[in-house]
Image (spheres, helix red, strand yellow):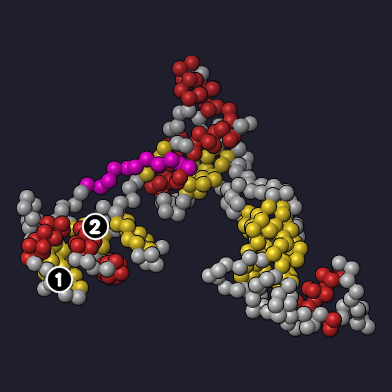
Amino acid sequence: MMTINSHRVAWTRVAMLAVLFGAASDSLASAAGMRLGSLCRLKGQETNTLQGLGLVVGLRGTGDGDALPTSRALARMMQLMGGPMSATRDGQLNLKDVAEAKNVAMVFVTATIPAVGAQAGDVVDVSVNAINAKSLEGGTLMLTPLLGPRADNPTVYALAQGSLTLSLDGPATSANIQAGAKMESSVPASFQKDGKITLILQRNFASFDTAQRIEDEINGLASLAFRSSMQMGSDRFAAQTRPTARAIDQLHVEVEIPELYRENPIKFISVLLDTTIQVSSQSARVVINEREGVVVIGKDVELAPVLIAHRNLRIEAGGRGMVPVGESNDPASAVKLKALADALNALDVPTTDLIEIIKTLQRKGDLYGEVVFQ
């Protein structure tokens, strides 16, 4: 049970709130069905980052100035483009010719390849970030080769160039180029290896229980072809159409592609990802987004018997407090966190205060549920 005392509310209102807090613990939520494709993704279907070092020209005196790395890169680019560059006695490029180029800046250039991969000729967006320049406003990125994330792989996957666009509310040292990189090499999104695929669970659902549920569901899966084969009594055909799954850990489930679908794995994967999996309820979880002031409370999150003092409110959860009509006077009755949130909302307590109360209850160990901060 839970009681509330406040110097600024009438006893009738307090009695009404006590009823809100008097609900007994409900039974655990039954398992809910979700598409397998909503619970996990295929290994190999992830984004990749391309990166490179480039030069931005056309700045309004906000470039790198006399930075030696920028001078070397600019001199080398001008030489490759046939520019008239002088050389020192030992044959090196004379950096004095470009030492005062304040309208040039060296930048990091990155591009993200989507999870489905990219083919030669595709275009992707580009992000540009200054290393030493004060501002990239008005600049243009010179042709820049983009490599993969591994430094030991010299393959040029894309070439980036174009006029920079700065965000209205972002820093002047970061910019974007929409469709600014053209793919020179394909980046395939492989999804199978040795006749097997690997499912990677989303972090919010990753657990040993969920992985085992997925394994059991897939191993018990009977496609239309499998059911037909059973009717025909063909054990060999049944074996060719039944998938085999093995949970590796709480994140990964390995699935062997049935023999019948080895030449057409896309059909098998589309049917597999559309399979409904019975997952355990997430109702004993609290998700808090402090920046946006959002609190989502599962219905099975409970509180231990506790006394909460907040400003001019006194809230007692559990024990022999006010007993609503029709409820038992059981000192062990659990109180739902949702009831506390409803009552505080009725008293116009700000969401920020509710978040602080939840944090304190969690630290004290009086909140029975998982708290996730975003």
Residue placed most toward the observer, 191 or 348: 348
Q: Neighbour class for label 2 at 10 Å: few (<14), some, many (≥20)?
A: many
**Residue at left offset 61%, top offset 32%:** 264
Q: Which residues are magenta?
A: 27-37
Vertical placement of 174 versus 259: above or below?
below
Q: Quadrant of residue 2?
A: bottom left
Q: At which x and y percent is residue 144?
A: 74, 63
Of pointers 2 and 1, the one earlier in the residue sequence: 1
Q: At which x and y percent is residue 243?
A: 51, 33
- The quadrant the N terminus occupies is bottom left
**Residue at left offset 86%, top offset 67%:** 80
Determine whether label 2 and label 1 are within 8 Å by CB: no
Magenta stretch holds residue 30: yes
Left or right, 322 with reference to 21:
left
Left or right, 233 with reference to 197:
left
Left or right, 4 with reference to 152:
left
- The quadrant the C terminus occupies is bottom left
Q: Neighbour class for label 1 at 10 Å: few (<14), some, many (≥20)?
A: some
Which label sits on residue 314? 1
Residue placed most toward the observer, 260 or 45: 45
Cα separation, mark 2 vs mark 1, equals 17 Å
Q: What is the secondary structure assignment of the residue under circle 1?
A: strand
Q: Quadrant of residue 11?
A: bottom left
Magenta stretch holds residue 145: no
Vertical placement of 131 versus 36: above or below?
below
Q: At which x and y percent is residue 208?
A: 41, 49
Residue identifier under label 2: 338
**Residue at left offset 64%, top offset 58%:** 178
Residue placed most toward the observer, 115 or 190: 115
Left or right, 263 with reference to 156:
left
